Image (tube, rainbow, N blue to C red):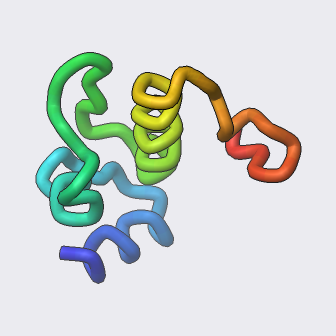
């Protein structure tokens, strides 16, 4: 599944929830906010949103990470 996800990223294809679950088994959850078959970059946004929700700060927007 990870190989398919990497190929999808390289080709600009959509990665579905099954691939996201496979790639991020400890953190990806369906729910609010939902990440429904978005492109690969949604993975980074998902992780950033999870950190922001759980830690109360948007570390991904900081200058040393700069993912947003």
What is the residue that sits farthest to the front in this orientation?
A: 55
- The percent coordinates of residue 25 (x first, y second) are 19, 59
Quadrant (top left/top right/bottom left/bottom right) for the N terminus: bottom left
Tell me, yes or no, if residue 19 can be seen here.
no
- The percent coordinates of residue 54 (x first, y second) are 41, 29
Q: Residue at x 12, y 53 (%)?
A: 18
What is the residue that sits farthest to the top in this orientation?
A: 32
Q: Is 13 left or right of 63, judged from the image as shown?
A: left
Q: Residue at x 27, y 58 (%)?
A: 24
Count of picture labels = 0
Q: Residue at x 24, y 31 (%)?
A: 36
Q: Is 66 left or right of 1, judged from the image as shown?
A: right
- The percent coordinates of residue 68 (x first, y second) are 70, 35
**Towards the viewer: 29 or 42:** 29
Q: Can you say whether 29 is above or below 40 in the image? A: above
**Towards the viewer: 67 or 19:** 67
Q: Residue at x 79, y 38 (%)?
A: 62
Q: Is 65 left or right of 42, judged from the image as shown?
A: right
Q: Can you say whether 6 is above or below 57 in the image? A: below
Tell me, yes or no, if residue 38 can be seen here.
yes
What is the residue that sits farthest to the bottom in this orientation?
A: 3
- The percent coordinates of residue 41 (x first, y second) are 50, 48
């Amino acid at each position: 599944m990870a190989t398919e996800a990497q190929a999808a990223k390289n080709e600009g294809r959509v990665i579905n929830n099954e691939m996201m679950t496979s790639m991020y088994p400890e953190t990806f959850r369906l729910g609010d906010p939902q990440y429904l078959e978005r492109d690969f970059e949604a993975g980074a946004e998902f992780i950033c949103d999870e950190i922001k929700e759980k830690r109360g700060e948007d570390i991904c927007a900081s200058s040393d990470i700069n993912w947003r």
